[in-house]
Image (cartoon, helix red, strand yellow):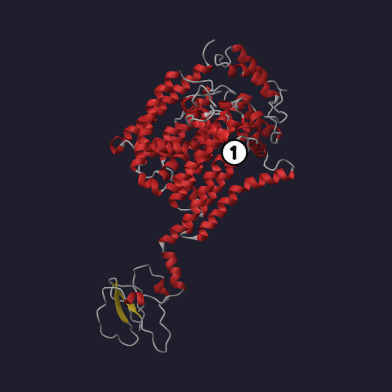
Amino acid sequence: MSKRASTRTPKAPLEAPAPPGKGRKSQANGRTETVPRKPPAEAPHKAPAEALRKPPGEPPDKSPGKPSRAAPGKPSRAAPGKPLRAAKRRASPKRTARGAATQPNRVWAAIRGVPRTAWICALVAILNAMCWSILIPPLQGPDEQAHLAYVQQLAENGSLPNGSSEENFSPEELAAMNDLGFGEVILDPGNPSLPFRASRARLDHDLSQPGLSRKGDGSVGVAASEPPLYYALQTVPYELGSGSSLLGRLELMRLLSALLSGLTVLLVFLFIREALPAVQWAWTVGALSAALSPLLGFVGGSLDPDALLFAVCAALFYCFARAFRRGFEPGIACAIGAVVATGFLTKVNFIAMIGGVVLGLILLTIRTARVSRRQAYRSLTFASGIALSPGLLYLLLNLVTHKPLLGIISGSLTTTERHNIPAELSYIWQFYLPHLPGMTRDFPGIFPPWHVWFKGLVARYNWLETSFPGWVYKVALIPTAAIAALCGRELFVKRGELRRRVGEFSVYALMLVSLMGLLAAASFDSYPTLSLADSEPRYFLPMLALGGALLALAARGAGKRWGPVAGAAIVMLFLGHNVLSQLLEISRYYHPV
């Protein structure tokens, strides 16, 4: 008997000595076992193969002259051997389930595991973005004329833009801009889109000319500095609609942006489920509010790479929440690396997420190394290698083509070297916070947190000229203050859990602070000529997953009894906000002259 078995209680009672070759019985943990006595000169007896093939729990057949050594009602304990291990493997349900999980259908099983409510929220986001795409006139989305030129450059010329910020677009697009009165409409809110029937007829006639070229010289305006992934995806609907007019192709490309908005909301739902798993109905509150957000619908209803950036950032939040909750395994590490690589290829603004990504990988590696250093370092290697692969490829391409090693970032670094650091820090502070004594007033006459950010998040669409009357923003302060109070109450009640998860929440906070710093620094580069004109509230929608989680916390902050009521009120508030914003868009472009 082993030392471990001999020290267990209760102690086995004394029994009479067993006959020679029969062994003796021992009792441990209430189970009677037969321990074979080793014969002095013979090999140990092996159980018949037929007995090993019996199902678990069924006693083996007795062979003549070989009486069973098992106690009545107990199966025989056969000597260890390869056939026995094989039988156990065949009979083990855990091994069978693990083997089935490695089949290719596990991806489909994961998709089926997504709650039906999440799909409904995603569908609401898609329909909302499609409604906005109908309301927004052609080329009136944010810099939509430049984004369209980028897609057309890839689809028609098969090459990237030449890097010029000039707007030497294709003759087809220039004809559309001229007939749509592009310059007059964006500069004067009093000008509607295509006010006369003759203008529509002229537009259709000009775009249907057979000799109208679709190729430009590679100049795509302000979109020239952006990575190509979003535009490469948009070449698919562009080619599908190649037989239609430019406006028909534009509407198909907007549809893809709407689908990306649905993907964003789906990932927001999954993030809230991982980050706040306790109250299930709160997941729907956060995701459905995000789906009804007018800014998300506005961006998803136009041709804008922000639509893909929002989905990538929501996926990044979800991957980190899953890793912190379920462990830093190689699978989730590869997912984080793939999301980061996709973000690098989507938009330059994604660089603001890198600080949080680095901090998150460090914290996850340290925590996982306490259990398994091999798994921790292996996961870190996978995540880092996949994430850095696009950057290394970009550096190699610039080196081979004799371009600046960091591309457009090289120029930004050169400009930063000429900055007055104290003046820039003062500017960044006043960009979000009140002016402090001793600071130079960079924004005389306005208060950026109110005039830029709050009003912009409530309603400021198109070219930042479409907004509500002033009293609407003052009324909007009431529900905003109530939501903030409920969210603060829930955070105070759950302060213990907040302290336990301080590492995870610090990752999200660093992403937010880094994004704020990037936007302020970009505005400082153009100060004072453009200043706040570059500060659009839609640039904060990469934090949409975090905003949805805060709304879910606000609903929970009303308590178990009134929480669902508060959640329904928050959803209805966003629904009303969205409807009023769409009516505002209609009044901007479709009023009679």
Residue 157 location, x and y as percent?
Answer: 71, 33
Q: Is residue 522 visible?
A: yes
Q: Amino acid at mark 1?
A: Thr
Q: Residues within 10 Å of mark 1 (few under 14, many from 20)?
A: many
Q: Is residue 93 left or right of residue 517?
A: left
Residue 499 location, x and y as percent?
Answer: 39, 47
Q: Is residue 99 left or right of residue 528?
A: left
Q: Give whichever of 367, 437 is nearer the camera.
A: 437
The residue beneath circle 1 is 346
Residue 6 location, x and y as percent?
Answer: 32, 77
* SS of the residue under disc 1: loop
Q: Quadrant of residue 174?
A: top right
Give the answer, above or below, for where 386 lies relative to 549.
below
Q: Which quadrant is the N terminus positioned in?
A: bottom left
Count of numbered labels shown in the rendering? 1
Residue found 38% across the figure and 84% down from its top? 38
Residue found 50% across the figure and 42% down from its top? 510
Q: Is residue 61 visible?
A: no
Residue 565 location, x and y as percent?
Answer: 32, 32
